[in-house]
Amino acid sequence: MVHDLRFLLILVTIWVVLGLAGLLGLHSIRLERLLFLLGALVAFSVAVLAGMFLAAGGTAQVLVLPLGLPDLPFHIRLDALSAFFLLLVGVAGAGISTFAAGYFRSGEGTAPALLGLQYHVFLASMAVVILADDAYLFMVAWETMALSSYFLVTSQHRIPDIRRAGFLYLIMAHVGAICILLSFGVLQGGSWQFTFDAMRGASLTPFWATTAFLLALLGFGAKAGLVPLHVWLPEAHPAAPSPVSAMMSGLMLKTAIYGMLRISFDLLHVRLWWWGALLLALGLFSALYGAIFAAVQTDMKRLLAYSSIENIGVIFTGIGLAILFETSGLRLFAALAFTAALVHALNHALFKSLLFLATGSVLHATKQRSLGKLGGLIRHMPWVATLALVGTLSIAGLPPLNGFVSEWLLLQSFLFTPQLPHAFLNMLIPLGAAALALTVALAAYVMVKFYGVIFLGQPREASLANARDANWLERLGLGWLALGCIVIGVLPQLALRSAAAVTGTLLGESVRPSATVWWIAPIASGQASYSGLILLLGIVGVVGVAFVLVRFLAHGRVRRTATWDCGYPWQTSRMQDTAEGFGQPIRHMFGGFFRMERDLPSPTDRAPRYRIHIEDRLWRGIYLPIARGVQRLADAIGVVQSGRLSIYLLYSFLTLIALLIFVLL
Amino acid sequence: MSGITFIRQLAEVVLAIAIAPLFSGWIAQCRAWLQNRSAPPLLQPYRMLDKLFHKDAALAMDASALFRATPYVLFGAMALAAAIIPSLVTDLPLARVADAIALIGLFATARVFQSLAAMDIGTAFGTMGARREMMVGFLAEPALLMVLFNAFLVFGSTALPDLVDGYAAHRAAVDPSVIFAAVAFLMVLLAENARLPIDNPATHLELTMIHEAMLLEYSARHLALVEWASSLKLFNYACIGFALFLPWGIATHGQDGGLPLFLAFAALIGKLALAGAALAFVESLSAKLRIFRAPEYLAMAFLIAVLGLLVHLLLRA
Amino acid sequence: MPTSHLIAQVLNVLAAGLLLISFAMLSRRRTQRLITLLAWQGAILFLSTCLVAHSSGLSEIYYSAALTLMLKVIALPWILHRLIYQLGAQWDSEPLVNIPATMLVGLVLVIFAFGLAQPISMLATTITRHTLGIALAVILLAFLMMITRRKAITQVIGFLAMENGLFFAATSATYGMPMVIELGIALDLLVGVFILGIFFFQIREQFDSLDLHHLESLKED
Amino acid sequence: MEILLVLGLPLLGSVLLALFGARRFAAELNAAMSLATLIVSSLLVLRVIRHGPMLVGHEQFFVDSFNVFLVGLTAFVGFTTALFSRPYMRIEEHLGRVTPGRLRLYHSMYQLFMGAMLLALLTNNMGLLWVAMEAATLSTVLLVSLYRTRASLEAAWKYFILCGVGIAQALFGTILLYFAAEQTLGREGMTALLWTHLNAVKGQLEPRVLGLAFVFLLVGYGTKVGLAPLHNWLPDAHAEGPTPVSAVLSGLLLNVALYAVIRCKVLVEGSVGRSLPGHMLMTFGLLSAVLGAFFLWRQRDIKRLFGYSSIEHMGIITFAFGLGGPVANFAALLHMTVHSLTKSSIFFTAGHASQTAGTQQMDGIRGLLGISPTIGWGLMLGSIAILGMPPFGVFASEFLILTTAMREHPWSTPFLLIALGVAFAAIFSRVQPMVFGESDAPPLPHSPALLPVFVHLAMVLTLGLYMPPALAEWYRAAARLIG
């Protein structure tokens, strides 16, 4: 019974059609709104289909389309893994599209119709990437995804910085894509079949398997923003319009995760334990790196971008653990780590999109991106503030919301690493757990900064007073995502059950989704367990009781007074602690990571100013040298074209002689 | 859940809420003795709470709903934690809701809410306090996790009831690593509960304070709830410590009935008394650290915990 | 048979002459002199072609001999003479760097060419087979000459010398290409020279000189 | 019959245009003649598809699936380029860069050039092939020097001398070939130069001679393909000639030259075996690809830029042919097709772009989207296509080539990776600011004809996503022929 797949295909095509339909009215924003809403509907149905498929157990369905290369028609396949990621795309996509329907205004950069086209092509290509079952279709969809998102990023192409960001993004994406291509070239292993089925069948020597794995890691790592391949991410995500940032950060990065999982767990049979160690190290480093840089950002979207790097790092950590366990035969623990990675991917899709969209609303309401010019918006934009609070708490990894679930699962799987049969490794990895804990807590720090500086405190600019709250469509979109965060947080069983289908097919083993409906105990009931539902009910219950008692026994009288000014009556809102201030402890502690230039005012300054500029060491360390090297090489080679005819003749002459000698020998 | 267990659960929560202020009062008294001050009466905390509850709450002009809700959230979180931690008996209906790691998460929730509330008014002190509180938090967490890791390695679970039962099963086996873990845990406890040497609960000297800085804008019943919550937090930490390192006397599975319960209660009181005295002693010996010495302090705690871990792995192998 | 042997001897002598002329071209400075040498080359080609025709008894080679006479001995040199007179370039000469070195390189080339041609010419059935190496040598020498020259006209002369070498190769190794091809080649050659003639004037009016160092502006800088 | 027309029509056209080339309707006539050629050659194509290879005119003309597809391509691009050149040359005239007299030369030479290329493709006679190539060179020399500026003269001169010398080498190669053939075939009825006959007996041909012959042929025709280090004429000629000529040069002439090389390769392989020619081609290919990519990095002139990109792509195609085998040959043929379609369309847009900006210097070209969205999007999409981004067809062939290389000659992939990466960075970093950003240039006097651009791009896009079975079969057959 293949019609799940058929339906999905139809839905994907509908996306494309919607995109094209926008061209009917090139500048009519109304039409676009409608189309975006329809797109949201489609996304929702994709999610529903994928969810039903997973619930049904996820037996693979295959289909061959009469398109593509002559010997290589497009193969598509729906199995548990792809269904899970489709679910992710659908759920988050529905929210983002709804928001986008209310967000895009005409007169901002590209014409709305083109925006709509690129947007829907972007969505569709992501779905196809996940559905693809042969290398060619995969690559086509993959690059289409990069391309459409590039155009979306540069939709306001009159700003040079945005152009620069877009260029950096596209070049990284393209080079990564070539690496993935080469990896496929290895994977097909002599059978000139580029279908994934053939690759599953192909038997590779460890050397070739490693080559394929490393190439894939390069390619997908570049897309996912794994340090040190992350440089494009903090440039491109802020440059894009907020719904697009949400899509890129929430969904597109996950397609890279999908690719990594697909290749290393499905297409490759040989797996070496040190791959896992490598991924683990890279993941932890990225996580820490992202968190630290996020803490010192002063632009709200850059902050979120760096936090994306952090979360991607967390996910890769999970994958690395899974490989380590799997190669040591500890399948159940592998399943646990794998599940943690999957669930965290899903969660990140939800709360990161939510937060990016929230910044979008703030941007529209205030025209400000710099944290130094925001503040106190909870009073003017209560809706956005409340929904963003949900996202903030989730991404900070706090129970009873969803962010905590995945991190809890990951820590749980870390607890079993001492059972690994590798000396040293099983003593080192616990430190990894510590690093993870540090990262999680840092994320909480970052998010307090984010939320506090934007929504709390006094408005730092007078203009903020007339900020308007989001319109109903935007609220709907935000609300949907927030709901997602809460539901997964409170009923993690749902996510676990979906993930169980995946691990079941890929690892042959899966964690127990839940002991009872009440709580989850992934390894064994009676072992470590957690219940978001009861936590939530408990807190709410106690709070309610406490509230009633206080009101009942004491009283509810409130006197509104001025803020205590510590005896200094001339305080202004500019005297609040700033984003820089909030980042200061981090700068102080992790100074080694940054390249800082700052000019401090001297006490005698008439108009004292404080400026700090923080840079990524890796950028100067790796990328600029490469660029310079290419430039030098190009200059050296340019000498060849000297302009003198006799020199050119000499070239031909020497070539001739050389070839003749070559033939003689 | 059957009625009796439910009642037991309820009793434990109520007990915790009731005696938490007493515990902090007792610590204050011990400190006073050790510093040859005339000690405040033991019930002073209750008097203060009572006073605060009957005052009118003075709220800053533009305090948001978040600001007003936070005290209740804090209190709720801490009370729930108290319900989960086996302070008297291990087979509680709620005990399975969260293992130790989840408990840390719960505390983190409380911390975040408190920091956000502190930033809400937008005074310099509030934000500064929030920043420092979060900083201490993210420094303390790795050490705490290492402690739990250690416990897991010894008893194969991070659920507190299992740990306690595990002790009961083979109480003779005291792993040397546990001692390291205990020291680390104590250091973390001091840091997390705004005690010396990280923070001084008794000071209002603006530039050094962390916890107090966040409460500056609170008054009356809100303040009362916050204070109560923080004493509950201290109590909870103490109980976690007992569950991890001196679980003697806690009524394990099957040991229901009056006597074990009473014994457990007595044991708890005794342990609390000793622990309070010990805390006061440690605090009196130590001086407040500069805020940027805090990382070194917590790094030390982390190091000790890791040492414990490695010791365990070595001995096991 | 003795006559064919004799003919072969004569052919070899002619070939040697061809080679000699190529070396002479390498070392001449005066443009006019070069043109004369070119004409001489053509003449030798004509003779050798006649001989080949005679010995092989293939009539169409006579045609190609006639073609050679008309084109290479009469037409092209004449056109070139007219050109340089009209361009007023008949007296100008160009400095050549280090003629002995050039000669030495040329010598090496000749050896190389012979070595290259040796195994092949063994296969040939024609009586002229040994001259294949010489033809190749002539081609390479002409190439060398084009490289060393700094003036447009002299480069063209080098180019034509190369054609001569090719033609010689064709006749000596294979009794000449089929007629159609030869006609086509000749036509191309003629048209090419005409176009070049046009070019000379244009270049002159643009740069008022035919020195190639004016034509070095298009480059990577 | 068709063949006669295919060859006759362009010649007739060049004669007519030599007479009326200066008239108002000359451009239309040019287009019409090209259209006629296109129609006839498509008839020829259909016929070959239906009845298979054909050998006509005393075996002087030979059509198999390899060259017939190039014939179709050549006729098609010739036609679209004629369409494009109509408004383009009008604008040039309007800008006073060409006189009616020059236009006459231009049109007549254009047709002659098309004729010469078709002859080169269709002939079965290696000598005739040589003659046709030389004729093509001569006609394009005049086209390149059309503007009579210093730069264009210099470019034409270099083009002439380099290609002349190269072609001379090719002639020597041909002579050697003939010489070798004579040993086996004898010289009865001058069949010894007919490719079909040579192909029949290639097994018996003397390997040493053929090895030498291949060297000369490769250097000779390779010069016209633009293989590094024989490429030096190419960027100048592309940059200085009128844009339609640049389009046909890199869209068609390079293909035809490469066609010649491959025909020779087939013969040589038969006698000396695969490895020698294969390695030569692969080396040349990689060298051209890498050098071309690095040259791209430092360009300022838009047409020069894309000239170098042609070198890079020719390198890739040559490399693929060097790899050999059904997959690689298939990919190479596909790449020939999509490259000539894409590159010509890029030159169309680049030409109009430089007309709007009034300069070929890329620093002077800004904000095309603002001036004329069609030009802007044309250039953007074209560059993206030529850079091998899916879903455009260029990617399809690069996909096959890279994956094949990865398995067969892994050592070569780093070079390809570098070449593609550098080329991408170079071209895109130039194109982006030209397309995006602000500009205040005035619109063109005549409306540009960009229909061909989008037709080409649409075809390339289709080839990337769906290849008609007939076409695929045809490519396969051709790939088999090349072996």
Image (spheres, rainbow, N blue to C red):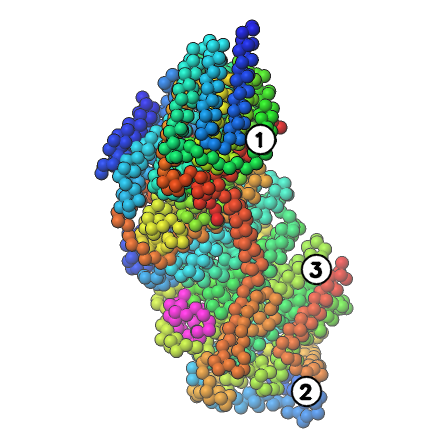
Residue lying at the far bottom in this picture: please name it. Answer: B38
Q: Position of residue A202 (x, y in %)?
A: 57, 39
Q: Is residue A58 magenta?
A: no
Q: Which residue is mark 2?
A: B31
Name which residue type carries label 3. Answer: Met
The quadrant of the rendering that contains the N terminus of chain B is bottom right
Q: Which numbered dot is residue A427?
A: 3
Occupied quadrant, residue B161: bottom right
Characterize the local packing of mark 2: few (<14), some (14-19) or many (20 or more) Cα atoms within 10 angstroms. Answer: many
Q: Is the residue D400 above or below the residue B23 in the image?
A: above
Q: Is the residue A611 above or below the residue A187 in the image?
A: below
- Between the residue at mark 3 and the residue at mark 1, the CA separation in whole angstroms equals 77 Å
Asked whether residue B261 appears in the rendered view, the answer is no
Name which residue type carries label 1. Answer: Met
Q: Which residue is mark 1?
A: C103
Residue lying at the far left in this picture: please name it. Answer: D24
Chain ID for label 3? A
Name the residue at 70% across, 60% down: A427
Asked whether residue D369 appears in the rendered view, the answer is yes
Name which residue type carries label 2. Answer: Arg
Q: Is residue A385 magenta?
A: yes
Characterize the local packing of mark 1: few (<14), some (14-19) or many (20 or more) Cα atoms within 10 angstroms. Answer: some
Q: Which residues are magenta?
A: A360-388
Characterize the local packing of mark 3: few (<14), some (14-19) or many (20 or more) Cα atoms within 10 angstroms. Answer: some
Q: Is the residue A225 above or below the residue A453 in the image?
A: above
